Image: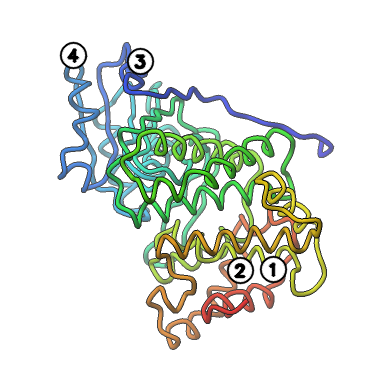
Amino acid sequence: MKNMEQFYAPIRVIMGADALASALEGHKKIFVVTDPFMAASGRIAYVIDLVRNLGGECSVFSECNADPDTETVSRGVSRLTEFGPDALVAFGGGSSIDAAKAMRYFAVHNCNLSECTFIAIPTTSGTGSEVTDYAVITDTAKAIKYPMGAPELLPDIAILDAALVTTVPLNVTANTGMDVLTHAIEAYTTKTHNDFTDAMAEKSVELVYHYLLKVYRDPKNPNYRQRMHNASTLAGMAFNNSGLGLVHGMAHALGATFHIPHGGACGLMLPYVMHFNAGCSTSLTPTAHRYAMIANMLGIGSQSIRQSALIVIRTIRQAEEKMKMPNSIQKSGVSEEQFLAALDGLTEKAFNDPCTAGNLQPVTMEEIKDIYEKAYYGKY
C-alpha cells in the first residue's frame, strides 16, 4: 500500500462578508473560542452579533493566548462539554484555531460531545490552520511544542473574510506572511509532495510573491488582504497533505525555547534552511532543482540551477529586510549565553520534531546544530 499518493480536503471554504451567516444556518447554540484581545477589543462581535440576530445562544471562551498550552485546552474542554453546542466557532489567529481543534478532539474522544459543526474563522493570513488536521499545543513546563494530527482536528467549514484582516499590525502581517511562504515552499519540497499539493503550493508562492509586500505597504487594501488570505489557505491545504520540513522542525524548537512568534521563527530560519537544503555551499541537491522551479515559475530564474535557487533565497531575505524582520537569532533578542546554553537541546528537539522527518534533503543532528549557529550569528 506504500506505492500510492493521495490528496484529501473534505472542507467547505466560504469567502466574503455573508460567509458566516451561511455557515451558521440551522445552528442555535454556538461555542466560540478566541483570544483575550478579540474579546476585549469587541472584534468578537463579528460572531456574537450575528448569532444573536439569528436567534441563537453564544458562550465565549477567550483564554487562548499565543502558543496555546495544555492547561488552556483542558479548561476549554470543560466549558465546551458543559455548554453542549451544536456549532464550535474558532475565531482568531492560529493559536485560537489550534486550541479549538484540541478542545474538540478531546471533547469528542473523552466527553462524548454530540455532533457539532466546527467552523474556523482566521483573523490573520498565516497559519492555514483553518484547513488542516494539525494543531500545535505547548507543554509549558517542558518547553515543548507537541504537533497533533488527526482527522477530527479538521474544521468542517473555513470562513475567509478579508474584512477581518485589514487592521492586522504590520509586524503580524510580516510574520504571518512569512509563515504562509514557509508552508508553501516546504509543501513543495517534502518527500511526499505530489501534483495536487504542488499546484496549491505554487499558487500560494505566486500570491505571496506578488502581494505580501503590497499588503505590508498598503495594509487596508481589501484586494491585497484577500489574496494573502487565499494564499494562506492554499498553502494550508498543500501542507496538510504533503507535510512540512526542516524549517518547521527548527522553528518549533526555537519558538518554544525563546518565545519567538511562530511566523517570525519560520521566516528567520527559512533562508538558512533553504541554503542548506539546496547544497549551495557543497553540491546541488534535488531540493535545489525544486527551488529553481519556483524561481522559473516567478520569472526570476536563470539558466543555472544553483543561481536560480540563490535568487529565491535572496529574494526572501530582501523581502524580510523590507518588512524590518530580524535576520538572525541574535537580532531577535537572544543573548549568546542563552543561545549556547540551549543549543544542544534545540538541536535535539528539532531533529526529533515530526516535521523534520518530512524534509526532502536528509539532515543530521550535527548539520542542524550548524544551521542554528549560522542563523544565530547571521552567517550563511
Residue type at numbered disc 1: Phe
> Disc 1 vs disc 4: Cβ atoms closer than 8 Å?
no
Q: Which residue is mark 4?
A: 55
Query: In the rendered structure, which disc, 4 or 2, sits on the residue that comes first in sequence?
Result: 4
Occupied quadrant, residue 219: top left
Which element is circle 4 on?
Answer: loop
Label at residue 272 = 2
Please say which color scheme the image uses. rainbow
Mark 3 and mark 1: span between their CA atoms?
46 Å
Residue ID at (37%, 77%): 333
Q: Left of 191 or right of it: where is 142?
A: left
* Residue 22 at x, y percent in the picture: 35, 15
Query: In the rendered structure, which disc, 3 or 2, sits on the residue that comes first in sequence?
Result: 3
Occupied quadrant, residue 272: bottom right
Query: In the rendered structure, which disc, 3 or 1, sits on the residue that comes first in sequence?
Result: 3
Q: Is residue 30 above or below residue 229?
A: above
State whether residue 112 appears in this view: no
Task: Name the mark nearer the viewer: 3 or 2.
Answer: 2
Which element is circle 2 on?
Answer: helix
Which residue is nearer to you in this view: 322 or 49?
322
Q: Residue furthest top?
A: 26
* Residue 152 at x, y percent in the picture: 50, 33
* Residue 18 at x, y percent in the picture: 32, 19
Mark 3 and mark 2: span between their CA atoms?
44 Å
Label at residue 276 = 1
Q: Which residue is mark 3?
A: 22
Residue type at numbered disc 3: Ser
Mark 4, Cα crowd under 10 Å, few <14 / some 14-19 / many 20+, is few
